[in-house]
Amino acid sequence: MTTPLIARTTADLRQTVATWRRAGERVALVPTMGALHPGHISLVDLGRASAGRVVTSIFVNPTQFAPNEDFSKYPRTFDADVERLGKAGCDLVFAPSPDVMYGHGFATTISLEGPARAGLEDAFRPTHFAGVATVVAKLLIQCGPDIAIFGEKDFQQLAVIARMARDLDMPVEILGAPTLREADGLAMSSRNVYLSAAERAAAPALHRVLQDCAARIARGETFESVLAQGRAEIEKAGFKLDYLELRDAASLAAPGSDPKAALRLLAAARMGATRLIDNVHARQAQES
Ligand code: AMP
């Protein structure tokens, strides 16, 4: 158990990272919005396995929430988060205020195409990825890590960030980490606390249907019939479906004709007032 340092300003963050750099240490960054659960901690563990120092940022980023979304009621559990991070061996928690991140006159946004326009999350949250990419770009510039770690749970986000880092020649390695799940398959999420007991009991159906669809695709069934049945199953389980789609895992475009390319099944669905997302691989990439 360590007590992580807490930096509230970019200057404080940079000062500590600079002392580590002078000692020749590698640095990993794990960006989060707090309300930490074991899924987040698995990212910190991966950071520790890949670098001598781990920074976790906690910032509920207002610009990635639309006005009708849950920014004001998003769970905030800062003290418990810091304790968990200490137990996980995180060295520094970067917790800036909105004013530190978006000073007076702030006027810059990252503009995205490609995976950010795949017709998945972006179709339902049209301003979301510009907010995410801008804040992640800032965090990468503020911290200057060797590695930044993102969960596959937010698969489109991971693709958007990886694309941005490549396109802008950011000197950082973007690492994806597998989704941690509850015993019944529900992907861990800070938003799961919104679910009532009945909704929580129904929610694992989303992952069950994804897995079922992936198995049928692996058996060679036609994509469209698998997707049509999967969509009906998700609705039958009590969700209002936003999308269930099969995509090329790298570009997030519709599957091409290459039978060896990796495919991903992605879904978003609302259970009562709570919107859940999940994804599974539907076909692994095969060596030619
Ligand atoms: P958030 O705090 O929800 O913005 O998530 C911060 C990071 O944790 C993102 O990279 C997420 O993809 C990742 N994450 C969230 N839930 C999980 C999970 N169940 N397993 C692994 N990573 C996750």
Image (cartoon, rainbow, N blue to C red):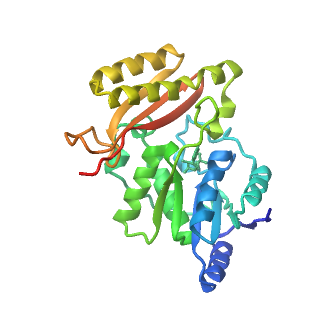
Examine the rendered structure and indicate whether residue 154 appears above or below residue 227.
Answer: below
In the image, is 195 to the left or to the right of 171? right
User: From where the camera sits, is residue 107 visible?
Assistant: no
Examine the rendered structure and indicate whether residue 243 appears above or below residue 72.
Answer: above
For the point 49% across and 51% down, the residue is: 131
Examine the rendered structure and indicate whether residue 52 appears above or below residue 65.
Answer: below
Examine the rendered structure and indicate whether residue 100 appears above or below residue 71.
Answer: below
Q: Residue furthest top?
A: 236
In the image, is 210 to the left or to the right of 36? left
Indicate the quadrant containing the N terminus: top left, top right, bottom left or bottom right: bottom right
Where is residue 141? Give x, y as percent: 51, 70
Task: Tell me which corner region of the image, top left, top right, bottom left or bottom right, holds residue 233.
Answer: top left
User: From where the camera sits, is residue 72 visible?
Assistant: yes
For the point 44% across and 58% down, the residue is: 109
For the point 42% across and 69% down, the residue is: 170
Q: Residue furthest left?
A: 257
Q: How many marks?
A: 0
Where is residue 47? Give x, y as percent: 59, 62
In the image, is 244 to the left or to the right of 84? left
